[in-house]
Image (spheres, rainbow, N blue to C red):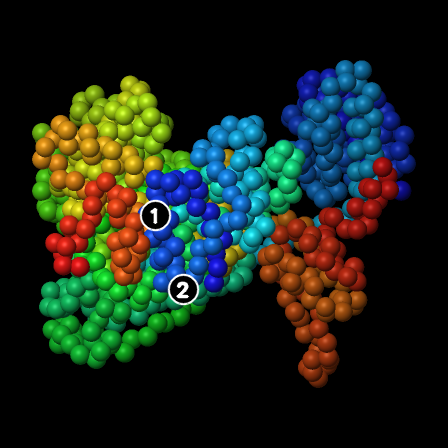
């Protein structure tokens, strides 16, 4: 089974491990994530003003190209997922907008593409039971906090892959992988997102809250599906350690990396070298 | 030739300002069959009515047309006047030239209004010529009432009807009457103990020789019509013989098994053979069959061994009882929105987040904590407690756009109850608006804030989570424009009031209407608040919509007065506007039977002299028929006609336009 796959720019640069581990995991689970032949940046930000047709052009172009290759497209990055899915909804709910965008990008997109996240593929197409069967290296009840951030869930009406208050899709996957999923209150709070470019203090506070909340509940590792969250949670820990020497570093890794490890991938395949805080000592401690 | 009189009303200036009533009267005088016409300032006044009566007598009129306001207003007035002058009331017709003419036209030259009034009046004159004198239908009345629901509204209705000397059957689904009110600790705004004021009424109902209480029972079926209903009641097996049980309670004491108490909303356990609460009426226990080891596995039977009178009967079966009643009062009450819907507030996950009704039990002296406020997780006295209002109410996303009405008041009450029991504690209330309309209600909520130290914060709560044994409440205070974080020990949610599960299926059994929230519809929200569209069925209490105790009691009494008025004579007269089938031409296709929304049309056998069935006819039951006319439209062979609205009359009016 081949699934059309849109990596987006981060997965080709700073988040290579995310991309690599996902593809390898897919292979193990019996499907192939086939990168779109033609793709461009998703735009990285969904235009909030309904009149802003221009900003829809880039994601619409992605959707158009993907539609030529199949009926659905799978993403990994939460931001890409959010932007592509919402663009699709925006184009579908207003045919005049769709026509204007089509005129501009000189395409004939009809709005019929389905945008899915890899988590949805694992849950709905493959099934977490199947993931559980495929696990070769149970992760020794590693205590993992699933951090959703905002992009996977909100706005609920357009995006939500799970309940917007109290989602469990990542926890369900973690449990299937043999980890102990840690539920923590701040798992759907904001990490600070793009403020990292101008207001690091805000990001430090917000991301710091997320980490503290997870650690307070006993999490040893935090997984995410958003490269920006991953960056912010790592970065803020650096600043925290500057002021608080007692802070014990918490590895922030992509859920696919942990999935890959549980499916028996090597450290290279799981792209563990790309992470600032290494998970390997923890695994060694557990004897896995 | 007809002798018709036309009376055109000016309604002060209401009609006269855009209709030349004098012109209308003189134009109508020219119509064939019209022998008299006049106009008057207020035709509905006593002198106006006298004019009508005098004209009928003097001019020997055989029909009158009154061009005035809507027939909803004064049709009765003029039909009465006609009757007293010796004219059949159904030979009096009203033309609406006010709501449907003068009020909608603003032409002060009166041209348009006058022309339209002429058209309308002319149509009705032609219609009137085809009117047949009709007689009110008399139907016998069975003077026994059925009250469905044994909460405070139903108890009040039953007591008032019984005090009026009529028999009542009070049906309650639970093992005891009392309803939600039995759960409450104290009641606003007087702070008197709920059970102390309710239980005397429960006992009164039990001891009343005109009231028969059927608990653990549900209405299965209702047939018939006003004055003549047949109700089938399912009496669920209690596994206890009610005639011999003395209510000593030995069985409950010795029963070795426990289950969650419905009455205590999961805050406590009860035995498997139980009464919901100590003051239960009747004081006869029931066995919770799915949890009873004897009934499921055939082992135990301790209750039967200890029972002195030998009242335990494991062989008991559900029983169906049929009763004849003349009127029905529906008082099935309300429920609270299911808690699982509030994931963001930690309901179901965090033990110390409870519903308002659970808090009532915690504050009740007969509750699981004996009236002490202990939080459910560890039994500690909460030092900080947060109350959240409008949980689910006024929230389209949760499917409830209405205000639940009583929460502002009971939350204020909760803060006081808390303060009276935990003197050093602090209560916080998050609210959207404070709606305290009612006698001494506003004063009550002010008292909570000003004298009882409750901290009111205007804003919503975003989420609630646990941290270090505390329940952290994160919300907004919109008055100061700040974010608020409260480390509370306990949280109470004022969840939305919703209709009872199964309210819709009961409505369908009874043939009454309900809205999209499955609250029952009144006949008219202002002027007929306890009647339903089905004659003889009345409504009381929160099955109509969220309401407090005083309102429920008022509605109970109001329904009772309606029932007693209905029962005041042996027969009741009703409007003769009913359908009739021309049986010679009916071909028994049953389209009308299917179309009739009131199941008023029966399939009737046609027999020869030997009694053999030789054919079938549709037959309209005059008692049930509401005169809606759907059957007339449905009939393919055009053999159903509606008295007072016959095809002949309707076409005569149309042709006169």
Residue denoted by label 1: A18
Label 2 lies in what chain? A
Quadrant of res B288: bottom left
Residue A30 numbered tag: 2
Within 10 Å of disc 1 (Cα), the crowding (few <14, some 14-19, many 20+) is many
Q: Position of residue A26 (x, y in %)?
A: 39, 58
Q: Is residue A241 left or right of residue B570?
A: left
User: What is the quadrant of residue B410 in the picture?
Assistant: top left
Q: CA distance from mark 2 to mark 1?
A: 18 Å
Question: Measured along the vertical axis of the image, is residue B46 above or below residue B626?
Answer: above
**Mark toward the start of the polypeptide (2 vs 1):** 1
- Residue B270 visible, this orientation: yes
Indicate left or right for A70 with B314 as reference: right
Q: Which mark is residue B647?
A: none
Task: Name the chain under label 1.
Answer: A
Q: How crowded is the residue under tag 2: few (<14 C-alpha within 10 Å), some, or many (20+)?
A: few
**Which residue is drawn at the image coordinates 31% and 54% (left, top)?**
A269
Picture quarter with the C terminus of chain B: top right
Does the rendering let one see residue B219?
no
Residue B282 is situated, as x and y percent measured from the top left of the image, at 24, 59
Numbered disc 1: secondary structure: helix
Question: Residue at image x 27%, y 78%?
Answer: B315
Give the residue drawn at x 34%, y 37%.
A228
Residue B566, x across and y down, in percent? 50, 49
């Amino acid at each position: 089974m081949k699934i059309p796959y849109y990596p987006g720019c981060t997965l080709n640069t700073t988040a290579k491990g995310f991309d690599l581990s996902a593809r390898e995991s897919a292979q193990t689970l019996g499907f192939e994530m086939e990168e779109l032949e033609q793709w461009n940046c998703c735009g990285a930000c969904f235009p909030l003003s309904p009149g802003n047709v221009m900003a829809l052009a880039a994601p619409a172009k992605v959707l158009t190209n993907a539609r030529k290759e199949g009926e659905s497209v799978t993403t990994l990055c939460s931001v890409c997922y959010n932007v592509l899915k919402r663009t699709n909804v925006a184009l579908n709910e207003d045919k005049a907008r769709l026509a204007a965008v089509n005129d501009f990008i000189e395409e004939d997109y009809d709005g019929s593409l389905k945008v899915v996240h890899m988590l949805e593929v694992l849950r709905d197409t493959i099934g977490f039971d199947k993931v559980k069967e495929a696990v070769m290296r149970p992760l020794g009840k590693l205590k993992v906090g699933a951090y959703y951030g905002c992009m996977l869930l909100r706005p609920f009406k357009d995006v939500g892959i799970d309940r917007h208050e109290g989602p469990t899709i990542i926890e369900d996957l973690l449990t299937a992988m043999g980890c102990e999923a840690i539920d923590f209150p701040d798992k759907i709070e904001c990490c600070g997102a793009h403020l990292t470019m101008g207001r690091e203090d805000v990001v430090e506070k917000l991301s710091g809250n997320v980490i503290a909340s997870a650690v307070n509940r006993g999490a040893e590792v935090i997984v995410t599906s958003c490269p920006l969250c991953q960056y912010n949670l790592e970065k803020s820990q650096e600043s925290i350690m500057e002021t608080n020497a007692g802070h014990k570093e918490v590895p922030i890794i992509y859920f696919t990396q942990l999935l890959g490890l549980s499916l028996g991938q090597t450290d290279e395949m799981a792209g563990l070298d790309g992470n600032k805080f290494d998970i390997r000592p923890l695994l060694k401690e557990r004897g896995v | 030739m007809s002798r018709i009189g036309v009376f055109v009303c000016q309604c002060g200036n209401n009609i006269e300002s855009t209709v030349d009533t004098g012109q209308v009267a003189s134009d109508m005088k020219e119509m064939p069959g019209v022998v008299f016409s006049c106009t008057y300032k207020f035709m509905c006044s006593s002198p106006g009515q006298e004019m009508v009566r005098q004209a009928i007598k003097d001019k020997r009129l055989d029909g009158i047309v009154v061009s005035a306001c809507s027939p909803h207003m004064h049709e009765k007035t003029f039909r009465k006047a006609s009757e007293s002058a010796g004219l059949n009331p159904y030979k009096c017709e009203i033309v609406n030239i006010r709501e449907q003419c003068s009020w909608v036209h603003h032409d002060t030259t009166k041209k348009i209004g006058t022309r339209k009034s002429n058209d309308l009046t002319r149509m009705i004159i032609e219609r009137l010529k085809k009117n047949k004198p009709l007689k009110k239908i008399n139907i016998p009345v069975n003077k026994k009432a059925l009250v469905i629901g044994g909460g405070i509204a139903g108890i009040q209705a039953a007591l008032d009807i019984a005090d009026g000397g009529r028999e009542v059957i009070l049906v309650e689904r639970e093992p005891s009457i009392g309803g939600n009110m039995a759960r409450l600790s104290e009641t606003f705004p007087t702070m008197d103990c709920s059970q102390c004021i309710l239980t005397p009424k429960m006992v009164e109902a039990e001891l009343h020789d005109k009231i028969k209480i059927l608990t653990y029972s549900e209405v299965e079926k209702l047939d018939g019509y006003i004055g003549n209903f047949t109700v089938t009641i399912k009496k669920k097996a209690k596994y206890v013989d009610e005639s011999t049980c003395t209510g000593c309670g030995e069985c409950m004491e010795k029963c070795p098994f426990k289950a969650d108490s419905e009455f205590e909303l999961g805050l406590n356990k009860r035995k498997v053979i139980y009464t919901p609460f100590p003051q239960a009426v009747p004081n006869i226990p029931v066995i919770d069959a799915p949890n009873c080891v004897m009934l499921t596995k055939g082992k135990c039977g301790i209750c039967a061994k200890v029972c002195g009178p030998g009242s335990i009967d494991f062989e008991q079966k559900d029983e169906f009882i049929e009763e004849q009643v003349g009127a029905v009062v529906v008082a099935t009450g309300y429920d609270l929105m299911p808690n699982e819907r509030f994931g963001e507030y930690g309901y179901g996950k965090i033990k110390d987040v409870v519903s308002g009704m659970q808090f009532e039990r915690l504050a009740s002296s007969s509750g699981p904590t004996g009236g002490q406020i202990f939080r459910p997780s560890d039994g500690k006295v909460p030092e900080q407690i947060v109350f959240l209002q409008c949980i689910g109410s006024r929230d389209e996303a949760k499917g409830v756009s209405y205000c639940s009405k009583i929460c502002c008041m009971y939350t204020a009450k909760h803060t006081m109850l808390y303060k009276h029991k935990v003197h050093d504690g602090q209560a916080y209330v998050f609210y959207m608006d404070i709606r305290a309309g009612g006698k001494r209600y506003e004063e009550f909520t002010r008292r909570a804030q000003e004298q009882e130290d409750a901290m009111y914060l205007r804003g919503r709560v975003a989420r609630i989570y646990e941290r270090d044994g505390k329940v952290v409440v994160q919300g907004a205070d919109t008055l100061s424009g700040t974010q608020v974080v409260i480390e509370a020990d306990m949280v109470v949610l004022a969840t939305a009031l919703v209709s009872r599960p199964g309210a819709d299926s009961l409505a369908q059994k009874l043939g009454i209407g309900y809205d999209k929230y499955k609250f029952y519809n009144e006949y008219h929200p202002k002027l007929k608040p306890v009647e339903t569209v089905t004659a003889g069925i009345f409504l009381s209490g929160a099955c109509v919509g969220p309401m407090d105790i005083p309102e429920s009691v008022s509605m109970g009494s109001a329904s009772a007065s309606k029932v007693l008025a209905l029962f005041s004579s042996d027969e009741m007269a009703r409007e003769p506007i009913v359908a009739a089938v021309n049986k010679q031409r009916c071909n028994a296709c049953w389209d009308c039977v299917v179309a009739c929304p009131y199941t008023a049309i029966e399939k009737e056998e046609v027999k020869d002299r030997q009694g053999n069935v030789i054919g079938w006819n549709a037959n309209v039951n005059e008692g049930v028929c509401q005169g809606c006319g759907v059957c007339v439209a449905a009939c393919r062979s055009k053999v159903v006609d509606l008295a007072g609205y016959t095809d002949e009359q309707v076409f005569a009016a149309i042709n006169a336009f």
